[in-house]
Amino acid sequence: MKAPILCWIRRDLRLADNQMLSAAAGTGRPVIPVFLLDPEAQALGAAPKWRLGQGLAVFADGLQALGSRLILRRGPAVEGLRALIDETGADTVWWHRLYDGASVARDRAVKSALTEAGIDARSFPGHVLFEPWKVETGSGGPYRVYSPFWRAVRGRPVGASLRAPATLVPPAAWPGSDDLADWRLGAAMNRGAGVVAKYARVGAAAAQARLDEFLHGAVTDYARLRDFPGAAATSGLSENLTYGEISPRQIWNAGLAALEVGAGGAETFLKELAWREFAYHLIYHFPAIERDNWRPEWDAFPWRGDNADAEAWRRGRTGEPLVDAAMRELLVTGTMHNRARMIAASYLTKHLLTHWRVGLDWFADCLIDWDPASNAMGWQWVAGSGPDAAPYFRVFNPATQAEKFDKSGAYRRNFLHEGQSDPPEAACDFLAAAPRLWGLSRGDEYPARRIELAEGRARALAAYQAGKGGGV
């Protein structure tokens, strides 16, 4: 029997349009899929790590249906792969590329070590539509502004999506594997895991169903309704994209097909997918964006570090109903509507003058659709310190935003239990998911405002004006 191929699984928990698995199946050689719980995976926040475990379980079932299995190992990537090479006689290791700084550094070290040992180490595309080094401005170099980036990629071919392999040849003997349950990937979620599980849609089949439902329904009014958090107007696919349960190419091709038959919101939907793409291109070319101000002149801006106001924000107890509803949606569902994300982020960084990294870290702990590129660019965009950013003097007013985008109050009522004799399920789920040490109960009174909105806006603008002397 020919030497097996080790297929290192990361954020590509799908069989369809999996370029690595399709290529491996095409060789006719034995294929050993392996997931490594390495330091990068261990560093994930509570909700992303729990959701990763859910995705791995479903993906393992899909492999089993093909006569294959998912091998689980714990430890640094180089050591784990070397051990499997020794145990199986594999002379080939393949993986799909990732683009954030930590992943790029790890993958380069792995490739160097394996190549030096005579192993065929190869990476495949698939987590983004276009490789970041292949999209350049006319003068060379990456795009730094979204609008010209969109014009540059909108007509580029992405290729046809690939069918799932019909079978994967097993090795003569399978190497040993950890038990997924022993990893306890959801331990940090505590009692919140059971709540979020009600709202998550895990696996490739769920992702495809989501896409089909959206393109046969909500896409028609997507451009008009996507900013209304109380409307079922978005696809929800960010959760599945994060773990590669569906590829961006599958979504892009389906969105183009909808556009060609005249689906009203299809182009706006494709633009949102390209916004994710833009974020990944930026983090690849400028990895410091994940923790540092994109615009260094903002380093002197007087944002506060963590503080009592930020803690009230995390707990959904700021006294601003739309902000609090958004923060409770995050804890209940592991996601947050995009318009609500902008409002909650603006409130923290501007009304509460708190550094965007405080919010970024909380989202990284609580989002089941967390990814490093979108999280970093989103926070810096709202804060004013990032690429293509909203100007700092654009301060989202939660009250006027609520009047415009949640006029009926449906979204706020869905997540705020205070003042309701019979609150809806999601509002009660917040009480079930919140840490016990917060001491929340059905009898809570709604909190007073941390700061009056006009006062918060004036304070933010004064800080901005004072900071302009430092280049802000």
Image: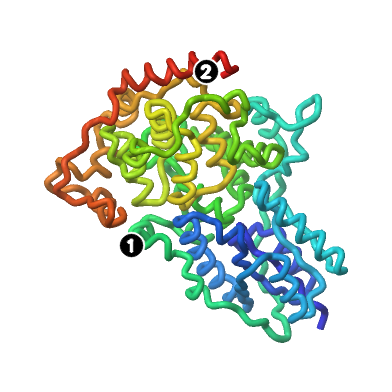
Q: Is residue 81 visible?
A: yes
Q: Indicate whether 294 appears above or below 126.
A: above
Q: Position of residue 307 (x, y in %)?
A: 38, 38
What amino acid is at disc 2? Gly
Above or below for 143 versus 85: above
Q: Badges 2 and 1: C-beta atoms under 8 Å apart?
A: no
Name which residue lies at 63% across and 69% down: 75
- Residue 333 or residue 458, whichever sits in front: 458
Residue 191's disc number: 1
Task: Please tell me whether mark 1 sits on a helix, a strand or a loop.
Answer: loop
Nearer to us in this view, 334 or 190: 190
Residue in front for this viewpoint, 418 or 124: 418
Q: Determine the image quadrant of residue 234.
A: top left
Specify the quadrant of the image occupied by residue 420.
Answer: top left
Tally the marks. 2
Q: Residue furthest toward the left?
A: 421
Q: Secondary structure at mark 2?
A: helix
Residue occupying the point 37% across, 55% down: 199
Q: Amino acid at mark 1?
A: Arg
Image position of 342 with respect to 159: above or below: above
Dot 2 corresponds to which residue?
467
Q: Is residue 260 visible?
A: no
- Residue 361: percent from left, percent from top: 48, 45
Residue at 44% of width from left, 32% of height from top? 304
Image-quadrant location for residue 310:
top left
Left or right of 252 in this view: 80: right
**Neighbour tally class for label 2: few under 14, some 14-19, many 20 plus, Cα within 10 Å:** some
Residue 38 horizontal/vertical position (percent): 62, 64
Q: Going by the image, does 26 lie left or right of 468?
A: right
Instruction: Write the residue at 42% across / 37% down.
Output: 341
